[in-house]
Amino acid sequence: MISPVRLASRLGMAAGVLVAGQVLAQDSWFVDDVPDFDQRRRAGGGRDGLPGEGGMYCVPTSSLNWLAYIANRGIEQAEVLDGPRDWQDDANYQRVTEALDLLGALMGTHPVDGTTGGGQAVGLAVYNLAFCQSDLTIVEGSIWGDGNAPSPNRLLTSHLLGGYTETTYGNYGSPDGGTRDGGHALSAIGIWDLSSGQNPIFQFRDPADDGADNTQSNFRVSLAAMTQVTGAFRSKPGDLPVVRTLWRLDVTDETDNFLDSMTTFYPAAGVFASDQEANEIRIVRPVRPSGNPMPLTQFFSKPAGTGRILDTAFGQDMTAYYYITAQGTPAKPDLWRLDALTGQSVAALPNPFAPSRIAMGRSYDAYLIEGANVVRYKVKSVPGTALASTSFSMPPAGLAYNDLNDTLLVLSQPPTSGDPRRVFTKSRTLAAGGTDRALPVTLEGSVYIQPDAADEDAFWVAGRGGLLGLDAVVYKIRWDAIARRLVVDETITRPRTTISGLQVINDEGIVLTIGGELLELIKDSRGNWVNKPDSRWTGRQAEGAVALSRSRTDFDHAVMTGPSFNNLQDPTIYPSHPDCYADCDGDGALTIFDFLCFQNKFEVRDLAADCDLDGRWTIFDFLCFQNRFSAGCE
């Protein structure tokens, strides 16, 4: 048994506020008006159902809760959700069913096994591109990937940074740990009382808390006490156990459900660096849903006397930004970590040797060009630690990380012999092996390389070229398995201009830094590269290094697939109450039956019956409920 805990019954508390780089103290948060769609949907009455009646659709449904919330706040998602709408209104039921069917198809949701983490990442990426104009950056993290477990503080951080988070709990067979045997997805909408010293209360939308039907049930706030447990956990039978500290979701009895992954939707963003003496780092969010706590633009200063910024990158989970300065301590380049919440910069590494370029891996790995070497660091903690180093037959000039196949791409400096540059690949560990191939084009000046967003065997390079070497040129290069060489797939030329950056943030186009401004290009129906209409990025000033956010997942197919990662057919149904707390029985009207409902919950010590939040069930809870009943509902 766990000790009694306090809970949030119906919070209307203000979100955390980021002001001048510091977080205002708070120990509770709640997001109001998040939809609570039913995953179980049975065909009937002229309405469609879902495959398997939606019994395995918890992941698409938890994601769609947030997508519908965002659709009501500026990212409308035409042709699918087409917000804003009253999502509680049953008139929108068929539209939501069709959206769930679409999202499930994009995610590869199986009517028996459910949705894999990899399927969710692919499906959300396609949906974001097709219906949200890539206005969102979606980040997935799991204890079986990046090693970070969802926790009260981590969920708070995501919320304060303007993220909308979906979590998954795994069923581990024991309240002390064990082997994963299925899981269930939830939409995280709040936590009550992080700092009380007692178990904080997790508040969430549970897509499985209503039986299969063809009408929308009343939205409800589900509740669970969060209990911290350190134990031995396995991802699947036969694997070696690993010691983890996870948060268990309890009621009054312990469960075997542990939060083990989270997916967060952030507004897309860019890190822009300049050579000014103050406000050298600018964070830009071209689209911000209404009510989001993050500003459209933020300015931060780097430490004094550190020289100009050479390169920038987003941290894997969007909670930090990294940048390289031309002069560190003593008098050589440094890598810095800028905390997205506090706005404070700290040295991310114990002053490595002259880093010039940075690429971030999928699991808190930073790859730096240091002279003739590329060095891999773990930057999960500060300062980071060196993990591996490698050198190549020619010194590196540019690098990028390919999420599709977990390889590092390295573009060499030009050889003095006049031979072509080389393109190297290495595994994420920088172990021996990899490839060494001749680049089929000539590039001069500062050069850039980025993986293609859809084809793991293709990449993009950019630099100075053309007949006189005065043009900005960009090439898409792919490996031709028949010819056994790299070949050019696409060529883009901007005559008599200077290129100083290349971004590939989705599989529909690219963003270039040309003449100190951003330019977003896409292909038209004839196959020509043209300026993207209504681009979020074109025309923005970019006199220095730029990094644009992109969706990332730490999904590892070798570890995170199989029956252990299937969705649960019958997940735990946690205590819940209607969005209108006084409407205890959820019938849409305030009557004497609500008092009887509250009394029944009180007698069994239901979490939702601690109305006055004092951690006990007393006469004062009845008085509290009476006051709420008298106040009525919106």
Image (cartoon, helix red, strand yellow):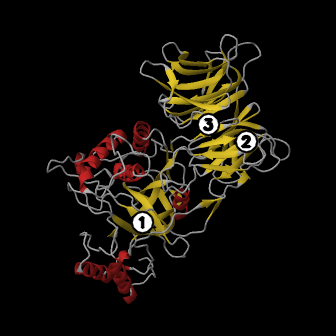
* Residue nearest the viewer, comparing 535 with 354: 535
Residue named by callout 3: 540
Secondary structure under tag 2 reads strand
Residue 60 screen position, x and y as percent: 35, 48
Please tell me how crowded label 2 is: few (under 14), some (14-19), or many (20+) other residues with Cα within 10 Å.
many
Sequence-first disc among 2 and 3:
2
Please tell me whether residue 400 is drawn above or below residue 171 in the rendered image. above
Q: CA distance from mark 3 to mark 1?
A: 39 Å
Q: How many marks?
A: 3
Residue 304 screen position, x and y as percent: 81, 50
| Labels 3, 1: front one | 3
Q: Give left or right: position of 238 versus 577.
A: right
Q: Give the image quarter of residue 314.
A: top right
Residue named by callout 1: 203
Residue type (three-letter) at the residue carrying disc 1:
Gln
* Residue nearest the viewer, comparing 248 with 601: 601
Please tell me whether residue 358 is drawn above or below residue 469 in the rendered image. below
Quick one: quadrant of the N terminus?
bottom left
Q: Give left or right: position of 353 versus 31.
A: right
Residue named by callout 2: 324
Q: Residue at x 40, y 87 (%)?
A: 620
Sequence-first disc among 2 and 1:
1
* Residue nearest the viewer, comparing 602 with 169: 602
Residue type (three-letter) at the residue carrying disc 2:
Ile
Residue type (three-letter) at the residue carrying disc 3:
Arg
Q: Give the image quarter of residue 202.
A: bottom left
Q: CA distance from mark 2 to mark 1?
A: 40 Å
Q: Which residue in the rendered view is the most extreme toward the right?
A: 330
Residue 136 visible to an observer of this rendering? yes
Secondary structure under tag 1 reads strand
Residue 426 screen position, x and y as percent: 61, 31
Residue 144 visible to an observer of this rendering? no
